[in-house]
Image: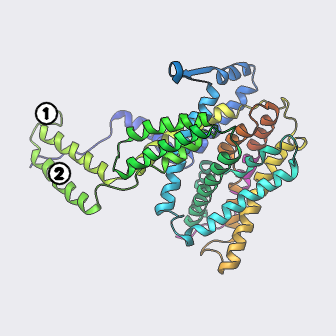
Amino acid sequence: MPKLIKCGLDPIDRVLMPFTRFFKTQSSGGVLLIGCAVLALLWANSPWAGSYERLWTTPFTVGYGPAMLQKPLLLWVNDGLMALFFFVVGLEIKREFMVGELSTVSQALLPIVAAAGGMVAPAAIYALINGSGPGGQGWGVPMATDIAFALGILALLGDRVPVQLKVFLTAVAIVDDIGAVLVIALFYTSSISTWLLLAAAAGLAVAFAGNRMGVRTPVFYAVVGAVVWVLVLKSGVHSTVAGVLMAFAIPARTRCEPEGFITGAGRLLDEYRSALEPGSSVLTNAGIHSALLSIDDLATRAQTPLQRLEHSLHPVVEYAIMPVFALANAGVVLGGGAGPVLANPVSLGVVAGLVLGKPLGVVLAVWGVAALSGGLPAGLRMRHFAGVGMLAGIGFTMSLFIAALAFEGDPALLAGAKIGVLGASCLAGAAGYLLLRGLPAVKA
């Protein structure tokens, strides 16, 4: 039997290994997001601020003739790239409801109630401060939680955070995302075209029918999704809703059960071994190449399309779409019309909602469930939930997104909301970190 050659690292792999390790950490996406937000702030307040404004207002055209779409680059980011972001959110929501922390009533009860409290309290506090004034429509801004930042800070705390707390925060953020999508769809839409919305529903029906018929190729869902996105965009409902709805049409069934995969993989490995010849390689040995292709196909059939898409798109969203969104939306001119935070009702409402309302809503909801159910989950105390409530006050991506919808066409109010979101996210993140850092390390 020929000697098998071990798989080694190329020189370039050794050079890139530190960067690869960084991007595999949970906090790396949050670090990149912060970097782009800081860059946007510096750029918008620098002598080159005009170039920042010109970049994101540059018209960009896609299509031809009657099928042409022309939008400023900022709207391509907020309406187009963010639809893909919400598509991945939809995939996560579907997985959580099927097999995750929201798959049973007992598992889902605490995070659902906590997320509800963490959405209602901030909106109520914001409404108390702004009332029916010009900034009143921004009540949805402090409702959102940025899961990337929140989990990144939990990762920095290491063994001081129990695993069940990370699971709880993830589940809360998923429910929070569902709430944000509903708020966007119901309250932050323009005039609605019923016919275009019905056409979008027909497109979704085609996608779900493809799922039922066993269509698994990503190209089919990409084409149908693009059509649905355009129809929803033109209907008046915000186009990102199309991303979430399309995610629910993605198949979550495997074509190859574990027993079949084990049997098939064993047979193909035997074929690979028998095809090995001294001095041959995959380029010259058709048997080896055929076995490798068959192994790759078998591995693909053993996975679900939902898992494959979530796995492949998550890095794109975390390391490309969200940083670009931050770069495009965080460039608020400080002192340029928004005024001091304490003197601006919109900024004050956002800060109070995220920094005070979020932890208050989460803690009161958890306390209520614990009082009715007989206590907190094993290994957790109220300080854990207070810390998570503070981290849930990191609104950032979702809050900036809702602010752009709420105050579209009113730069002064939008600037005030952005300043509030950025300031509140920093305060909530620091407070949550310090509160959880003071807890003893979890015993192995």
At mark 2, the secondary structure is helix
Residues drawn in magenta: 424-444
Residue 24 at what x, y percent from top left? 48, 46
Q: Is residue 187 above or below residue 41?
A: below
Q: Is residue 247 above or below residue 10?
A: below
- Are the residues flagged by discs 2 and 1 in contact, CB closer than 8 Å? no
Q: Is residue 402 above or below residue 269?
A: above
- Please name the residue shown 58% across and 58% down the image: 170
Residue 417 visible at all: yes
Disc 2 marks a residue whose amino acid type is Leu
In the image, residue 31 lies in the stretch drawn in magenta: no
Residue 1 at what x, y percent from top left? 8, 49
- Residue 199 appears left or right of 425: left
The residue to which callout 1 is attached is: 284
Dot 1 alpha-carbon crowd within 10 angstroms: few under 14, some 14 to 19, many 20 or more: few
The residue to which callout 2 is attached is: 268
Magenta region's main secondary structure?
Answer: helix
Which residue is nearer to you in this view: 442 or 393?
Answer: 393
> Residues under labels 2 and 1: Cα distance?
18 Å
- Residue 330 appears left or right of 178: right
- Please name the residue shown 58% across and 54% down the image: 155
Which residue is nearer to you in this view: 4 or 129?
Answer: 129
Dot 2 alpha-carbon crowd within 10 angstroms: few under 14, some 14 to 19, many 20 or more: many
Give the tally of numbered discs: 2
